[in-house]
Image (cartoon, helix red, strand yellow):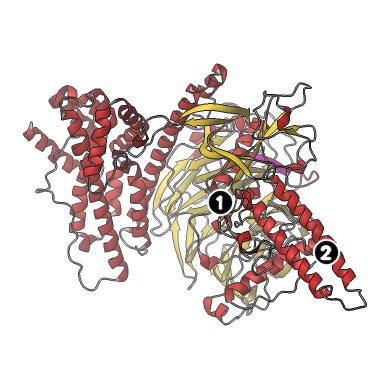
Amino acid sequence: MTSNSQTFSDVARKNFFLNICPNAVLDSVSNIILTLCGQDAEDDAGYLDVTVSETKHPPPQLGPMPDGLSSYQILRRHILCSIVQSERSYLESLKRILQEYQRPLMEAEPRILSPRKIRPIFFRLREIRQCHSMFQIALASRVAEWDTCEKIGDLFVASFSKSMVVDVYSDYVNNFTNAMAIIKKACMSKPAFLDFLKKKQVSSTDRITLYGLMVKPIQRFPQFILLLQDMLKNTPKGHVDRLPLQLALTELETLAEKLNEQKRLADQITETQQLARSISDRSLSKQLSSEQSSLVLCETLVETVYGERGQIVKSKERKVFLFNDLLICANINVKGPPDISSLVPVGPRYTMKWSAPLLQVQVVEVGQEASQSQETLFQHSGARRPGGGSASGKHQPGKGILGPPKLYQELQELQHDLSVVEKVTLLVGTLQGTYQNLNTTVAQDWCLALQRLIRIKEDQIQSANKCRLRLQVPGRPDKSGRPVSFMVVFNTPSPLSKISWVNRLHLAKIAQREENTSGWLCMEDDGRSKAPFWCPLLACRVPVFPTKAPNWRLEAALHNPVQCALLGFSAASTSLPQGYLWVACGGDSNQGQVEIFSLNRPTPRPVKSFQVGSPVLCLEYVPELMPTEEEEAGDLRSPTGVGNTICAGLDDGSILVYGSVDTAAQCLLTFRSPEGCPVLCLKHSGNLLFAGLRDGTVLVYGRGHGGELWDPGSCRRVTIGPDPVRTLLALDDSVWASCGNSVSVIDCCSLATQRFEVHPDPMVSVAHMVRAGGGVWMAFSEGSSIRLFHTETLEHLQEMNISTRSGFHHPSQKSMRVTSLLICQGLLWVGTAQGIIITLPVPKLEGIPKITGKGMISLNAHCGPVNCLVATSSMLSPDLLKRESMGDGPDSACGGEDRSDSSSQESLQQSGGLSHIETKGKGRGVLLQYRLKSTTGLPGRPLTGRGDEASDSSLESLEHSVEDGSIYELSDDPDMWVRGRPCERDGPRRDRVTSAAVISGGRGFHRLREGAGVTVTGGDSSDCTLMVWQLPLTV
């Protein structure tokens, strides 16, 4: 048997070094193994049991560093050492599981566990170890020749793109929850097994438990991804390893996403089954076990009950389950010996406390109680649940509010006292005589002290909202038939958890609308697959024009991001991304029109409309030019200060530049292209503005003397070809310009061009280009194919024909023509001339955006071509979610309800200025505005009558701790926003909450019927319509 095993080892190595092992070879080898090994190999079909000798194949070891290496070569060597050490440690962990746990259990006499239970625990671990043993052999060979080839990416592609590796890891991940359940049950029923695990942990040097070892395969590919990301960052363009590294990242990300999704589904099924077994209501239990029920989110939260004075009476952990149509709260009953939890996660048992239909559950923030229905009775959270009929737990609307809402009542009392003291101050100023402790200075001190107390109360309210999930849950009607609701307060582990719950509750309700219950159809399995929850949800659809305008057509749209200091994270969890949406239109006449929509609400709201002298063909958002460190150190500010701008290209050759500070849309600059040639596309890159013209040329403009606006006199012409330049795409240091069936790469420094052909048909033109990672997807004027090209080597990497993936186009049409393209959060959006929208999954990281899975077709479509697809996104910094004391940041400028527009603007401007002053270490002088009802914009230490203990975190309740909060209120007119100054030098942060939505524009709206492509519902097909697709928050 030893000789046969050695023979298989040689065969395996030969196939491994061929990069990709053919399926036929794998099948034949599998058959040989089954024949020689007999019954024991039946469970491991396809597994190659190879004995790898460390003497013949020593572990990888990098030789001495040669002289004369560049800095990036040195860094790449260090990263390679990390890869080698990480892989060696991983193999040691796998070896420990098999040799220190599986083998002793199998050989133990008397038996500790039966083999029938041992095999499922360690299922597929031998195969995983074998795959990585073979990978280590190839890695050792590559490390030995590193100084001559310096290539590692292709090795990862060859090793982890094979279906055998994917299947082995998938089996392990799918079985992981079952393996942990077997271990837990064995610990509780077999004392010898529990003692065995304890002894193994104590005798190990690192004290890692069996669970800690077995979770390593699940964590392996995310570790690989981090290492390859570091390697790619330190690999210069043009390096032989750059494209292989990008392809390797794509393969590993795809595999990791697949395994994560399988693990999530397995955990979801386990949690649902555990909950269903604990429910005595058979109909509800059956509902949870049905295919229509889907678990969206579940988490352990702390339910808190408050007393009459707002103090915490009691708190207890609950498990809260959010299903697609139901919200369930359950008690947690952890049973079993306490020492088991240190060895393996102990799954709790649940007892359902209450359940409620999702559509009847409302999130209520502190201070929003006044908006609740007067016809609803509220039951105290500590009283009996619905059906109990306890009248002692009810309170009539308008009476004293208990618990955290009492803070809002106290704030209103302080604001009333401040207004009275302000009047007293004015009266004191009219006194004719001089009196001790009764003068204007003392009265102003009274005002200042009250303002400080208001600020403390605002902090407490914001703190109460940050980690408090307050839900209004329906109960059974009382004896008179009036609806009864009870308020439940949950403490979330973090502000990020709170915002996740609010967002998922919001999206789950949207998902129950008729247009979303069957919103997407999988293109490759005849609709058998159920669309996952993370599919884009149609949040709303709005007309572009307030009145019918059949002669107008959509030409372009863009998102103008505006940071609003008055919008907190709770509002952001249900609203669209911050900013404005600009929609450009043209018509048969010589006029153009621009519609501006505000996006700071769940539905876009039109706020301004204006006309221009010619149809608008394109729009481009140009962010404010940030000063360099030298300019900022010398306080060399731009004299114009125009900030962010929006450029519009017109059919008469004009380029209009608008300010984007607010909705005034002031035209700051107008200039025309030579000969008045229509401007088909605009794109900025650094300090240059590129304009693609219909005559096949690109005009390049530089910035003026002030550094803000474009200088028409700096125009330079780049000739691309005889065909129109239909689209431009800005990359890091170049701009791609399409002309006919080719693309020219324009260097931003020298304006030199490099042309390459992207389609064999000279009659076809490149119509759309989008970039993600290291690739560019292109769509064409004719045909239904889209093509992927590498951004550096210009190599053609993938082609996809979307017409073969949809059955909704009319038989008379030969193919589906692509009219728009977009990449947003791992989805490639394709808009077609038939109004159909298709999404295709692509990687999110720095790899190659290859299509890696099944596409989805939206059953919500336009009646005409999808003219535009726009991605909108905004990020909320985690600095606003910290739980320390509140600082004088720019978002602390709002708090009181009763303030005028002017006072709100003053407070905001002061807070922004104070933040800048404090960062520079300058003085804190400020003119006190006594008419402000909020003091959060004032600097310095809060004043209080309670002394230093007022700012201590150990107060009588969690609501009364001074914590950093976010602003929940909006300005009096939330559509009129104030621009906040971004800081690009801070760079992207990992821990951010990102809100994203996609907006499609076209004529009309209709629903597709599977297999028919006919209109089911919809209004006038001639109306220009925007459809807003909301995506889950990424936390």
Q: Secondary structure at mark 1?
A: strand
Q: Which residue is mark 1?
A: 994
Q: Which residues are magenta?
A: 521-550
Mark sitting earlier along the chain (2/1): 2
What is the x, y in percent for residue 450? 75, 63
Q: Which residue is mark 2?
A: 421
**Amino acid found under the numbered disc labelled 1:** Thr
| 246 sits left or right of 281 in the view | left
Q: Nearer the viewer, residue 226 or 269?
A: 269
Placement of the N terminus among the 4 image quadrants: top left
The rendered magenta stretch, by its main secondary structure, is classed as loop
| 161 sits left or right of 882 in the view | left
Q: Secondary structure at mark 2?
A: helix
Q: Nearer the viewer, residue 846 or 21?
A: 846
Single out the mark in the foreground, 2 or 1: 2
Q: To which quarter of the image does residue 358 belong?
A: top right
